[in-house]
Image (tube, coloured by chain):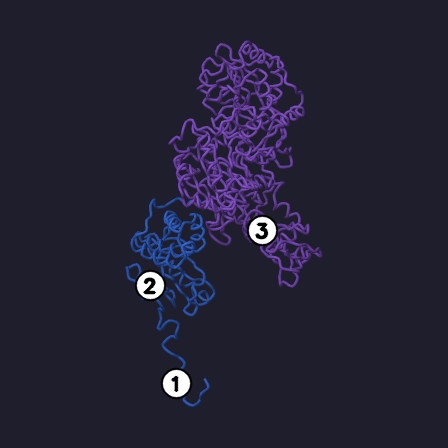
Chain colours: A blue, B purple
């Protein structure tokens, strides 16, 4: 924790976009319970840093601003921000690659995804940022999209049903500045079967009279 | 009341009690780390597991409310196994460094490991290690020893009112930290050392000095403020090693201010350990006899009206009594115990003490603070105000302030102005807060020294009394007009009538040549430089401070740890402290010095023992003989705001000024220069 004070910007003020979001967020809570706004406001600050500096993280000054806004002690915001791994308390790369390695993804080949990420970005270990400053690779717990395992979350977007080559292609596309459409990277719609429907191919009225499904 | 059966013993406990409290009521000892009587319940250490009949598994008794007819078992095989398992987990990451740990010998974890530890470890993986944090000059951290009970976090947030500590990160990575590496700003931070159940938070100045079982323990009274905190002085080999609080629910609960705890190292520095006499402008070491002769020679032929005496802030009642008797015997009307020049309404004792008592804060339902800064004047008392403020819930305990309570008094307040003008307007007008006070059942007004140590104090006090009467603060069964003193000796001085007698001079009158001979009993907190150049100054005290530097004769006295004495705190409570160690060198107890001088001067004081002096104390209150200060009204109100009389919190008396620790604190917490903890 001794490196907390390093790399920290001196100032942080919410910009207009953030202010508009904050107004909306705080309207949801009774004034004496506005401490509940800690989590959404941390997201607001992190996104604003992403917009302004290309690195979506929450510096200490931003947490101090949030504490002021919510009239709570700064340490209460630090506690929340460090508890949830969704908040980056240190600067990260332009793209945050979050590889799920929990059971479902692992069984479906998350090791390949991780290897591809490392290969394509040159990152050696989780938590590091690539030399070009574009990518930070993190290992995350279940992202709740097991039906589409394995998954790589890039910033706020899920890229699903990945394998090694497709992961590399995705990272190359990101490197070129493109943002491929999120969702499955194979031929399927959401978590529907690959290649289209497999069951209930007949229309309902063809089976009229049976009455029992 | 709810009836519960603990191990077959039926006990009645109030509804809403926890199972742990019920077990204690039945005389059962429940091991615990995170639970603390004066903090909120966290329930995260799991050490207090007990079995509740018909509950599917052991329950954490600290957070488990009792129900009628509940049967609790505290000593079954299930409970023992569960606690042993909890202990094993706690010890997984706890280092085996008890031999070099300052908590050793008074460590909850160590003690309970004897009862529930397994003796061997089944853990072969790597232990976790945590970086130590710098929490400032007072609290040392060895964070690898931390078991995350979060008592310190709760203490800072709830009692101290300075939420700076927190538990950051999660799971195995949890750390107790300020996150941004800063010194704790609380004046109660030393209590973190007491509440930490392991050796994670220990005393930084006292590190590696002594073991708890080596200490000789003596009960005493803290003199760093006027609260009269009950303390225990722990000494080894004639040296005071540390001071810890004793529990007294009426005064300090179980807290002690940082100044009271950490000024210890000032007790062996800059001490006056032998008599000195100034000869041709230079101080020379002399014998007691020579010092007495020098005094007797100088006093010879001086009329009583040209002799004066000033009592300092740390003196005990015995020496005040002895000095008063000596001065009256010499025919001097020039007595004063108010170094800061404060004026008190001495018409009745209840007018110059904290009349409602400190525990009265718990009953008050509205508070007006006038010219006081409780957080710095009396940190422990301020914790009481904060406790009341938190207990009352959102805006349930309205607090108004006239004067300066600093940026963060640790409670929310309505700032009504900064000086006597605001007070006059408040008393005259119909301010919304006046209505709140009026509607309160037990309104409380606290008047601080900032409002009384002024030219217009008489008028300020008259206004306060008028206000108190109009809002019902002085009523049958409730006296909420309180004076918050800052000097430990002040109420005793007032009680004993150590005030100018008819025709006598006050401190100010004695300066600039107002008297020919000036006796200072530990008095350093007044403009010493304003003493007339021709005035012969006798300084009797324990530290080489401002008074001793100006003195013509120095009589080395005893500090509060070195004498048995009686102190009267701000609420007028008479308490006795005992002698823990001997004064250094040739220094002597102050009343003995005065008794010895009196003999040389031919006015032998009529007591030879402390018991006889105390008998005299009991009879000796003649405060009525003193000319009353208030009501006055000669000067009219001054426009100056109520401003602090001291420079900061840490260096307010000769002992704390001699203390390297307190100087370091003053440096770190210097106002307006944000010095980060290195």
Res. B90 mark: 3
Which numbered disc covers residue A170?
Answer: 2
Q: Residue at x 38, y 75 (%)?
A: A194
Q: Is residue B198 left or right of residue B418?
A: right
Q: Nearer the viewer, residue B62 or B220?
A: B220
Q: Are marks 3 and 2 in contact (CB under 8 Å)?
A: no
Label of residue B61 in the image? none
The quarter holding residue B75 reads bottom right
Q: Which of the labelled discs sits on residue A204, or is there none?
A: 1
Residue A134 drawn above or below residue B359: below
**Label 3 crowd (10 A; few <14 / some 14-19 / many >=20):** some
For this view, does A46 lie left or right of residue A79?
left
| Labels 2, 1: one chain | yes
Q: Nearer the viewer, mark 1 or mark 3?
A: 1
Q: Position of residue B88 (x, y in %)?
A: 61, 52
Select label 3 or label 2 by which is in front: 3
Label 2 – label 1 distance at C-alpha: 40 Å
Chain of the residue under the numbered disc 1 shown in the image? A
Residue B492 visible somewhere in the drawing:
yes
- Position of the C terminus of chain B by quadrant: top left
Label 2: few (<14), some or many (≥20) within 10 Å? many
* Local secondary structure at mark 3: helix
| Label 3 chain ID | B
Residue A23 lies left or right of residue B116; in this view the side is left
Q: Does B78 appear above or below B104? A: below
Residue B568 in percent (x, y) is at 58, 31
């Amino acid at each position: 924790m001794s490196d907390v004070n390093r790399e920290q910007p001196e100032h942080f003020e919410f910009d207009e976009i953030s202010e508009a979001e904050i107004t909306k967020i705080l309207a949801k809570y009774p004034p004496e319970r506005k401490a509940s706004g800690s989590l959404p406001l941390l997201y607001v600050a992190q996104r604003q840093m992403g917009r302004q500096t290309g690195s979506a993280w929450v510096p200490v000054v931003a947490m101090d601003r949030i504490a002021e806004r919510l009239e709570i002690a700064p340490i209460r915001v630090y506690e929340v921000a460090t508890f949830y791994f969704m908040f980056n308390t240190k600067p990260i790369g332009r793209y945050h690659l979050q590889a799920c390695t929990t059971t479902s993804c692992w069984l479906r080949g998350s090791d390949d995804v991780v290897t591809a990420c490392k290969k394509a970005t040159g990152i050696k270990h989780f938590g590091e940022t690539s030399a070009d400053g574009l990518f930070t690779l993190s290992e995350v717990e279940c992202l709740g999209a097991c039906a589409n395992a394995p998954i790589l979350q890039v910033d706020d977007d899920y890229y699903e049903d990945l394998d090694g080559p497709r992961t590399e292609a995705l990272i190359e596309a990101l490197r070129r500045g493109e943002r491929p459409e999120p969702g499955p990277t194979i031929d399927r719609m959401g978590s529907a079967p690959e290649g289209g429907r497999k069951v209930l191919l007949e229309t309902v009225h063809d089976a009229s009279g049976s009455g029992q499904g | 009341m709810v009836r519960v059966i603990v191990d077959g013993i039926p006990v009645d406990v109030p509804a809403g009690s926890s199972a742990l409290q019920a077990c204690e009521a039945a005389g059962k000892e429940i091991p615990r780390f995170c639970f603390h009587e004066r903090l909120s319940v966290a329930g995260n250490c799991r050490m207090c597991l007990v079995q509740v009949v018909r509950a599917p598994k052991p329950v954490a008794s600290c957070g488990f409310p009792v129900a009628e007819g509940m049967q609790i078992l505290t000593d079954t095989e299930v409970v023992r196994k569960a606690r042993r398992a909890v202990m094993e987990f706690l010890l997984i990451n706890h280092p085996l460094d008890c031999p070099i740990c300052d908590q050793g010998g008074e460590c909850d974890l160590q003690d309970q490991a004897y009862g529930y530890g397994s003796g061997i470890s089944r853990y072969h993986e790597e232990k976790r290690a945590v970086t130590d944090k710098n929490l400032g000059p007072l609290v040392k951290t060895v964070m690898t020893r931390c078991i995350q009970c979060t008592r310190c976090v709760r203490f800072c947030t709830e009692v101290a009112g300075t939420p700076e500590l927190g538990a950051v990160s999660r799971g195995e990575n949890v750390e107790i930290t300020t996150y941004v590496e800063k010194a704790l700003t609380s004046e109660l931070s030393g209590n973190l050392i007491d509440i930490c159940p392991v050796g994670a938070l220990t005393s930084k100045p006292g590190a590696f000095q002594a073991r708890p079982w080596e200490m000789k323990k003596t009960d005493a009274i803290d003199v760093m403020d006027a609260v009269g905190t009950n303390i225990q002085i722990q000494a080894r080999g004639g040296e005071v090693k540390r001071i810890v609080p004793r529990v007294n629910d009426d005064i300090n609960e179980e807290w002690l201010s940082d100044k009271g705890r950490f000024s210890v190292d000032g007790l062996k520095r800059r001490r006056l350990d032998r008599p000195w006499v100034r000869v041709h402008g230079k101080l020379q070491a002399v014998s007691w006899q020579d010092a007495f002769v020098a005094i007797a020679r100088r006093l010879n032929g001086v009329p009583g009206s040209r002799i004066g005496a000033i009592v300092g802030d740390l003196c005990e009642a015995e020496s005040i009594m002895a000095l008063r008797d000596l001065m009256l015997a010499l025919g001097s009307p020039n007595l004063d115990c108010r170094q800061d020049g404060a004026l008190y309404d001495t018409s009745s004792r209840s007018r110059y003490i904290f009349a409602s008592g400190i525990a009265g804060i718990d009953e008050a339902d509205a508070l007006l603070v006038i010219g006081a800064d409780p957080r710095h004047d009396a940190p422990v008392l301020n914790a009481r105000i904060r406790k009341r403020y938190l207990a009352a819930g959102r805006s349930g305990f309205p607090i108004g302030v006239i004067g300066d309570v600093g940026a963060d008094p640790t409670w929310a307040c309505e700032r009504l102005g900064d000086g006597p003008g605001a007070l006059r307007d408040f008393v005259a007008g119909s301010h919304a807060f006046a209505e709140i006070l009026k509607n309160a059942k037990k309104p409380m007004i606290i008047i601080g020294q900032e409002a009384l140590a002024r030219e217009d104090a008489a008028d300020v006090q008259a206004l306060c009394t008028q206000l108190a009467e109009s809002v019902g603060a002085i009523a049958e069964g409730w006296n909420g007009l309180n004076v918050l003193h800052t000097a430990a000796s002040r109420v005793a001085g007032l009680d004993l009538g150590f005030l100018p007698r008819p025709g006598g001079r006050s401190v100010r009158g004695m300066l600039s040549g107002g008297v020919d001979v000036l006796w200072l009993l530990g008095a350093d907190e007044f403009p010493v430089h304003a003493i007339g150049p021709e005035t012969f100054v006798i300084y009797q005290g324990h530290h080489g401070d401002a008074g001793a530097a100006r003195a013509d004769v120095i009589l080395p006295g005893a500090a509060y740890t070195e004498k048995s004495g009686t102190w009267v705190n701000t609420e007028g409570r008479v308490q006795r402290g005992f002698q823990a160690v001997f004064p250094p060198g040739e220094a002597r107890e102050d009343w003995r010095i005065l008794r010895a001088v009196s003999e040389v001067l031919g006015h032998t004081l009529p007591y030879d023992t402390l018991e006889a002096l105390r008998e005299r104390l009991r009879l000796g209150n003649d405060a009525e003989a003193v000319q009353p200060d208030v009501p006055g009204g000669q000067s009219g109100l001054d426009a100056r705001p109520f401003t602090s009389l001291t420079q900061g919190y840490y260096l307010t008396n000769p002992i704390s000024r001699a203390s390297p620790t307190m100087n370091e604190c003053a440096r770190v917490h210097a106002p307006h220069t944000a010095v980060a903890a290195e």
